[in-house]
Amino acid sequence: MTTPKEVEIKLRLDPNKVRDFVESGRFAGVKSVEKHFHTVYFDDEKHHLFREGFELRVRGDGERYIRTLKSTDSVERSEWETEAADGHLSLEDLEAPGVEKFVKRGLALRAQFSLDVDRKTWDVAAGGSRIEVALDQGKLEAEGRQKQICEAELEL
Protein backbone atom coordinates (compact mmCIF):
# COMPACT_ATOMS: atom_id res chain seq x y z
CA MET A 1 0.00 0.00 0.00
CA THR A 2 1.33 3.44 -0.92
CA THR A 3 1.63 5.92 1.92
CA PRO A 4 -0.54 8.99 1.27
CA LYS A 5 1.53 12.17 0.96
CA GLU A 6 0.73 15.84 1.05
CA VAL A 7 2.87 18.84 0.17
CA GLU A 8 1.94 21.79 2.35
CA ILE A 9 3.35 25.22 3.07
CA LYS A 10 1.99 27.45 5.85
CA LEU A 11 2.44 31.22 5.92
CA ARG A 12 1.66 33.55 8.80
CA LEU A 13 -0.41 36.54 7.82
CA ASP A 14 -0.82 39.90 9.45
CA PRO A 15 -4.55 40.00 10.34
CA ASN A 16 -4.61 43.59 9.06
CA LYS A 17 -3.49 42.36 5.60
CA VAL A 18 -6.11 39.62 5.11
CA ARG A 19 -8.19 41.84 2.85
CA ASP A 20 -5.13 42.48 0.64
CA PHE A 21 -4.50 38.72 0.47
CA VAL A 22 -8.11 37.88 -0.47
CA GLU A 23 -8.39 40.72 -3.00
CA SER A 24 -4.96 40.14 -4.58
CA GLY A 25 -6.53 39.13 -7.90
CA ARG A 26 -5.23 35.56 -7.69
CA PHE A 27 -8.69 34.32 -6.70
CA ALA A 28 -10.65 36.26 -9.32
CA GLY A 29 -13.38 34.00 -10.68
CA VAL A 30 -12.52 31.20 -8.23
CA LYS A 31 -15.35 30.18 -5.92
CA SER A 32 -14.46 29.97 -2.24
CA VAL A 33 -15.81 27.59 0.39
CA GLU A 34 -16.13 28.59 4.04
CA LYS A 35 -16.20 26.26 7.08
CA HIS A 36 -15.57 26.38 10.80
CA PHE A 37 -13.26 23.74 12.31
CA HIS A 38 -12.58 22.70 15.88
CA THR A 39 -9.35 20.67 16.05
CA VAL A 40 -7.78 18.98 19.05
CA TYR A 41 -4.17 17.74 18.97
CA PHE A 42 -3.21 14.79 21.15
CA ASP A 43 -0.05 13.27 22.61
CA ASP A 44 0.96 11.67 25.87
CA GLU A 45 2.40 13.55 28.81
CA LYS A 46 6.00 13.08 27.58
CA HIS A 47 5.19 13.91 23.94
CA HIS A 48 6.27 10.51 22.59
CA LEU A 49 4.34 10.89 19.33
CA PHE A 50 5.94 14.25 18.58
CA ARG A 51 9.41 12.99 19.50
CA GLU A 52 8.95 10.09 17.07
CA GLY A 53 7.92 12.46 14.27
CA PHE A 54 4.11 12.32 14.40
CA GLU A 55 1.19 14.58 15.20
CA LEU A 56 -2.29 13.26 15.94
CA ARG A 57 -5.47 15.29 15.74
CA VAL A 58 -9.24 15.01 15.61
CA ARG A 59 -10.98 17.70 13.56
CA GLY A 60 -14.70 18.38 13.56
CA ASP A 61 -16.62 20.60 11.17
CA GLY A 62 -20.06 20.31 12.76
CA GLU A 63 -21.02 17.41 10.49
CA ARG A 64 -18.29 14.83 11.01
CA TYR A 65 -14.99 14.14 12.76
CA ILE A 66 -11.77 13.15 11.00
CA ARG A 67 -8.82 11.62 12.86
CA THR A 68 -5.48 12.39 11.20
CA LEU A 69 -1.99 11.13 11.92
CA LYS A 70 0.75 13.06 10.10
CA SER A 71 4.48 12.68 9.96
CA THR A 72 6.33 15.87 10.86
CA ASP A 73 9.47 15.21 8.84
CA SER A 74 9.27 17.84 6.07
CA VAL A 75 7.09 19.95 3.80
CA GLU A 76 6.13 16.70 1.99
CA ARG A 77 4.56 14.60 4.73
CA SER A 78 2.85 11.25 5.10
CA GLU A 79 -0.74 11.45 6.24
CA TRP A 80 -3.31 8.87 7.35
CA GLU A 81 -6.95 9.83 7.84
CA THR A 82 -10.00 7.97 9.08
CA GLU A 83 -13.44 9.03 10.12
CA ALA A 84 -13.92 9.21 13.89
CA ALA A 85 -17.66 8.63 14.21
CA ASP A 86 -18.19 10.60 17.42
CA GLY A 87 -14.83 12.29 17.85
CA HIS A 88 -13.53 9.13 19.56
CA LEU A 89 -9.75 8.94 19.60
CA SER A 90 -7.89 5.67 19.18
CA LEU A 91 -4.65 4.55 17.56
CA GLU A 92 -5.63 0.87 17.36
CA ASP A 93 -7.18 0.85 13.88
CA LEU A 94 -4.75 3.23 12.18
CA GLU A 95 -2.73 1.53 9.46
CA ALA A 96 0.40 3.65 9.52
CA PRO A 97 4.02 2.44 9.69
CA GLY A 98 5.41 2.69 13.22
CA VAL A 99 2.07 3.23 14.95
CA GLU A 100 1.97 -0.28 16.44
CA LYS A 101 4.75 0.56 18.90
CA PHE A 102 2.57 3.30 20.41
CA VAL A 103 -0.40 0.94 20.65
CA LYS A 104 1.79 -1.68 22.41
CA ARG A 105 3.02 0.92 24.87
CA GLY A 106 -0.56 1.90 25.62
CA LEU A 107 0.14 5.62 25.46
CA ALA A 108 -2.20 7.63 27.66
CA LEU A 109 -3.18 10.23 25.09
CA ARG A 110 -4.55 13.57 26.21
CA ALA A 111 -5.44 16.84 24.55
CA GLN A 112 -2.39 19.10 24.19
CA PHE A 113 -3.99 22.10 22.50
CA SER A 114 -6.96 23.02 20.35
CA LEU A 115 -7.69 25.28 17.42
CA ASP A 116 -10.95 26.98 16.50
CA VAL A 117 -10.71 28.48 13.03
CA ASP A 118 -12.87 29.89 10.32
CA ARG A 119 -11.41 28.60 7.05
CA LYS A 120 -11.92 29.97 3.57
CA THR A 121 -10.54 27.83 0.72
CA TRP A 122 -10.01 28.24 -2.99
CA ASP A 123 -8.94 25.60 -5.53
CA VAL A 124 -6.50 27.36 -7.84
CA ALA A 125 -5.09 25.92 -11.06
CA ALA A 126 -1.43 26.79 -11.63
CA GLY A 127 1.18 25.25 -13.92
CA GLY A 128 -0.86 22.12 -14.60
CA SER A 129 -1.45 21.49 -10.89
CA ARG A 130 -4.29 22.11 -8.49
CA ILE A 131 -3.40 24.02 -5.35
CA GLU A 132 -5.75 24.35 -2.43
CA VAL A 133 -5.29 27.74 -0.82
CA ALA A 134 -6.73 28.06 2.68
CA LEU A 135 -7.05 31.12 4.86
CA ASP A 136 -7.43 30.29 8.57
CA GLN A 137 -8.42 32.87 11.17
CA GLY A 138 -9.14 31.93 14.76
CA LYS A 139 -7.55 31.02 18.04
CA LEU A 140 -5.26 28.44 19.55
CA GLU A 141 -5.87 27.36 23.16
CA ALA A 142 -3.52 25.50 25.49
CA GLU A 143 -3.48 25.21 29.27
CA GLY A 144 -5.94 28.08 29.71
CA ARG A 145 -4.04 30.44 27.42
CA GLN A 146 -5.20 31.70 24.03
CA LYS A 147 -3.46 33.10 20.99
CA GLN A 148 -5.03 34.51 17.84
CA ILE A 149 -3.86 32.92 14.60
CA CYS A 150 -4.04 34.07 11.02
CA GLU A 151 -2.35 31.99 8.35
CA ALA A 152 -2.52 30.90 4.75
CA GLU A 153 -1.83 27.35 3.70
CA LEU A 154 -0.88 26.13 0.24
CA GLU A 155 -1.46 22.42 -0.35
CA LEU A 156 -0.54 20.60 -3.55
Image (tube, rainbow, N blue to C red):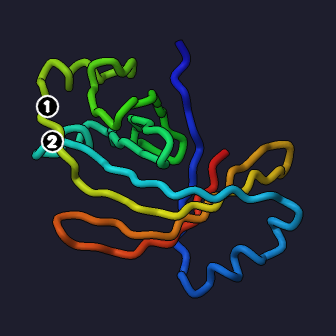
Q: Give the residue pinned by disc 1.
A: 107
| Residue 42 position (above or below residue 28) | above
Count of marks overlaid on the render = 2
What amino acid is at disc 1?
A: Leu
Q: Residue at x 39, y 31 (%)?
A: 84
Q: In which quarter of the image is the C terminus?
A: top right
Frontmost residue, 6 versus 67: 67
Does label 2 or label 1 sit earlier along the sequence? Answer: 2
Q: Give me the C-alpha separation between circle 2 and circle 1.
A: 6 Å
What amino acid is at disc 2?
A: Asp
Q: Residue at x 63, y 79 (%)?
A: 18
Give the image location of residue 28, x and y in percent. Answer: 86, 67
Give the image location of residue 127, x and y in percent. Answer: 85, 49
Q: Residue at x 68, y 81 (%)?
A: 19
Q: Which residue is drawn at 22% across and 72% down?
A: 145
| Residue 88 position (above or below residue 11) | above
Give the image location of residue 80, x and y in percent. Answer: 45, 29
* Mark 1: few/some/many CA within 10 Å (<14, 14-19, 20+): some
- Badge 2 element: loop
Kindly give the residue lying farthest to the top in the view shown. 1
Frontmost residue, 94 versus 49: 94
155 sits left or right of 58 in the view: right
Frontmost residue, 37 versus 47: 37
Give the image location of residue 46, x and y in percent. Answer: 11, 45
* Mark 2: few/some/many CA within 10 Å (<14, 14-19, 20+): some
Quarter where residue 56 is shown: top left
- Badge 1 element: loop
45 sits left or right of 80 in the view: left
Q: Give the residue pinned by disc 2.
A: 44
Quarter where residue 67 is shown: top left
41 sits left or right of 59 in the view: left
Is the Cβ of the residue at disc 2 closer than 8 Å to that at disc 1? yes
